[in-house]
Image: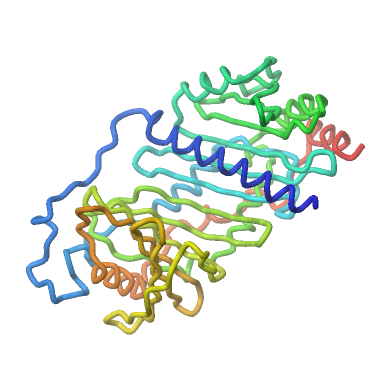
């Protein structure tokens, strides 16, 4: 029963986080986003029969650098203050990093298991977010108190109406932080939120981050397509981990020609398709890669699934009314990816700063409180 509650609560919180990301990533980012838009005439290839170079989407010289962007993500997230009481990856229920390379926006969300009285503790750390994020969150407090922290300027207290949580929202060096626990009819959780907030510190100060052990994908064995840098851009990167079924994926979202969106996913385990998708057949690329294509019942998008024998890949193509990308292009993208021999330049960013947490007074005080 407790695991069921944790899963349901996790879904509720993740839904809220997703909505927050939708509201924030584009609305509150400083500056205007610029996309690489091209006309249909510009992107058309002179020889439509050449699948491998169809629409000039693949370029062996002028290509996007996903690895550099992933390295930047891993380097950037080290700047955040993180919960200092986490001891190992077993504490993690769910974890997600979202990164917008063009704007440098990063959102780190994690949901940790507490104890019988506090089933879940959630954390968010956000980089390059507008101050209006905090203004909006502060306005949602039913009551709030000033957080006494040597770094974070923030408030904590009860939030919400029908579904209530005790939260802390604050900022340090322009980065935004959130700690929360479910109300559970326990007003002492307000004190718990304050105590958890006191443990926030950087990896350099001794915080242990289970991200590094959870991210078990072998970076030397993953592959990306060589998408033409003139026609496409990296829209977003995500590392997503669901602890209840030990599922990990690395997602790259591309925007092509300013019109078409493709999400390219690398998974450790094969994903079972839900009842909302219908298989429309198996195809083989020009280079012999066997691909299964699914179509979503309620949306005009297609998912292409294949494996290289080490990892499982999915390509989710969100069709538009005037899409410049077609099925032949997708198969050419798959062939390009499976031929990828590029490597990561900075592998150190995937290594943990600390293999164990350095527990100080705030962490020991919290641990005693949770175990009473």
Residue at the front extreme of this rendering: 298
Residue at the bottom extreme of this rendering: 288
Name the residue nearer the viewer: 68 or 268: 268
Residue 329: give x, y in percent of width and height: 24, 68
322 left or right of 280 in image: left
Name the residue nearer the viewer: 9 or 249: 9
Residue 67: give x, y in percent of width and height: 40, 57
In the rendered image, the vertical position of residue 239 relative to residue 33, given as above or below? below
Residue 254: give x, y in percent of width and height: 33, 54
In the rendered image, the vertical position of residue 278 relative to residue 129, given as above or below? below
Residue found at x 71% / y 45%: 112
> Quarter-wise, where is residue 140 in the image?
top right
Image colouring: rainbow
Residue found at x 61% / y 35%: 81
Residue 234: give x, y in percent of width and height: 34, 51
Residue found at x 74% / y 55%: 90
């Amino acid at each position: 029963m407790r695991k069921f509650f944790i899963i349901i609560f996790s879904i509720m919180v993740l839904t809220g986080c997703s909505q927050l990301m939708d509201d924030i990533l584009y609305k509150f980012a400083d500056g205007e986003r610029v996309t690489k838009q091209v006309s249909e005439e510009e992107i058309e290839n002179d020889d439509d029969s050449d699948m491998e170079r169809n629409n000039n989407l693949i370029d062996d010289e002028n290509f996007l650098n996903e690895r550099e962007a992933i390295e930047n993500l891993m380097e950037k997230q080290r700047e955040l203050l993180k919960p200092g009481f986490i001891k190992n990856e077993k504490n993690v229920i769910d974890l997600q990093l979202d990164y917008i390379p063009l704007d440098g926006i990063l959102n780190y969300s994690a949901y940790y298991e507490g104890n019988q009285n506090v089933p879940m503790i959630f954390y968010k750390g956000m980089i390059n977010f507008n101050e209006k994020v905090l203004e909006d969150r502060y306005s949602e407090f039913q009551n709030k108190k000033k957080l006494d922290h040597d770094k974070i300027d923030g408030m904590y207290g009860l939030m919400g109406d029908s579904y209530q949580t005790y939260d802390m929202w604050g900022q340090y060096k322009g980065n935004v932080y959130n700690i929360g626990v479910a109300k559970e009819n326990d007003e002492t959780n307000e004190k718990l939120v304050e105590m958890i907030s006191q443990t926030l510190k950087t990896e350099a100060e001794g915080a242990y981050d289970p991200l590094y052990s959870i991210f078990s994908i072998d970076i030397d064995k993953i592959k990306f397509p060589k998408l033409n840098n003139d026609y496409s851009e990296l829209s977003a990167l995500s590392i997503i981990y669901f602890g209840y079924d030990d599922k990990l994926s690395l997602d790259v979202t591309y925007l092509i020609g300013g019109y078409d969106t493709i999400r390219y996913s690398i998974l450790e385990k094969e994903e079972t398709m839900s009842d909302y998708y219908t298989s429309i057949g198996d195809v083989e690329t020009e280079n012999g890669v066997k691909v299964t294509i699914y179509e979503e019942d309620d949306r005009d998008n297609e998912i292409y699934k294949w494996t290289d024998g080490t990892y499982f890949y999915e390509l989710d193509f969100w069709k538009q009314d005037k899409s410049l990308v077609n099925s032949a292009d997708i198969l050419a993208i798959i062939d390009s990816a499976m031929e990828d021999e590029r490597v990561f330049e900075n592998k150190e960013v995937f290594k943990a700063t600390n293999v164990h947490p350095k527990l100080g007074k705030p962490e020991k005080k919290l641990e005693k409180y949770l175990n009473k």
